[in-house]
Image (cartoon, rainbow, N blue to C red):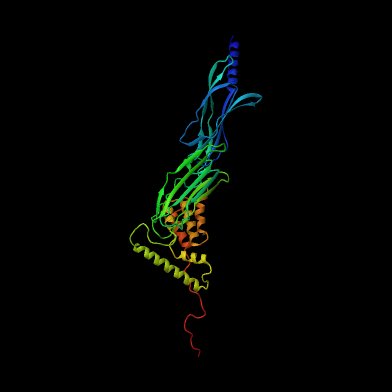
Amino acid sequence: MVMRISILIWLAMLTGAWAQGDTRLMILHDHGNPVVSEMVTLTIRGEYDLTVSLEDMQFPDSRDYDWIQIARDDWHKERVDGRLLQIFERKVAIFPRQPGLLTIGPVTHHLTFVTGDEGRETVDVTAPPARVNVKPFPGNRQPLAAQRLTLTDELSANPGQLRKDEVLTRRVTIEALGTLSHLLPPRPDLRQPWMISFTQPEQRETIPTPDGPVARVVWEWQLRPHTGEPAILPAETFPWFNTDNRQVEIAAMKPIPFGLAGFGANIGDSGPAPHYLGLIGGAIVAAGIIAALVLLLQGQGFGRKSEVIRRLRRLLPSPHLRAMRLAARENDLPALRGAAAAHLHWRGQREAPALAALDRQIFAHNPPRDFDPMHWLRDFHRATAPAPIKAPESGQTGPARESG
């Protein structure tokens, strides 16, 4: 009798094991070492030897990741180990918010299935948690990882040749595959004292696709000169991690010249131009005369216009100095890199070796912790300061002496 009861218990356990084996739910993911904000594609796959009539599965929210379903649920028949099973697949993309070991799940699928006597029963099938090791984002900017990113900068007119009262419309669109719209960078502030700007509400959207979500943001400004003098609207840089080549890249709104066609007085005031504008104009004229004299002394003449402009700019304050100081104070290294490169370009200088230390700090996997942006900026200015102008050498510089 005891043996019979034992056999019945063993058969019941075996039957339960087979019943449990008829339903299986798994969380599959595509790779194991993403960086913060990088898309990790999950496939939640169910294999059911059942005729499912109703189902419900809620993917769990977490403060450790963002997520989005990127395709419709797929139900189909598939032969697994010789048995024809009902297969369920759901595609989900998650975006880790912090480094470390990320736990996803468990996930439970609530099923209602048809029994052999045309009845209905329910069963819960649970997938065990999946774990992903998330690496820190390379850099100290807002994490942004994507498979592809494009930035389009559209201008309604030539920004350096605007007519009086003409409004320049600047429209910038960033579109990225493999991220969410709220992970795209915030809108930059284009306000300058020599310009009036009106900002339109930004547009953000995320579009699910089979290859992953496509995030898009659109910024638009209406810009009008406030003063007549020409100026440079500084560059804006946005570093992002390319998940295809595993490198940090820079998307940039390039610096643009801005001002009226022809140098004029302050158009924001109806009265005479302020005294400081006259001083600035006098300084520019004086600098032009000095540059011309330098060229004549060196025997180069005015044959090369670009050379004249380059030498003239070296005598004037760079429009990128303020952006460099602000980025250094805020420890915004990518913005500092962009402003420094724009400064060298404006001066007509090649990229200096001093940028190498900044590049190592931005892109190295384990950058030094004692890096001081303000100290680097002082070194950068010393290393890139224009050399003093030397007078041309001649055979004799004083009056000739009479020979004895």
Note whether residue 294 is visible: yes
Q: In the rendered image of this protein, does residue 191 appear above or below residue 129?
A: below
Front residue of this view, candidates 106 and 208: 208
- The residue nearer to you, when weighing 204 against 3, is 204
Q: Which residue shows up at 46% across the image and 46% down it? A: 219
Q: How many marks?
A: 0
Residue 285, quarter of picture: bottom left
38 or 174, nearer to the observer = 174
Q: Which quarter of the rendered picture does the N terminus lie within?
A: top right
Percent across and percent down for residue 41 are 55, 36
Q: Residue 88, relative to residue 305: is it above or below?
A: above
Q: In which quarter of the view is residue 45 placed?
A: top right
Residue at far bottom of view: 404
Q: Left of 319 or right of it: where is 82? A: right
Residue at the extreme left of the image, as rendered: 271
Residue 61 position in % (x across, y down):
47, 32
Residue 354 image offset from top left, x and y in percent: 50, 58
Left or right of 67? Residue 276 is left
> Horizontal and vertical percent for residue 143?
48, 44
One can see residue 367 in this view: no
* Residue beneath the point at 40% across and 49% down: 198
Above or below, 281 against 26 in this view is below
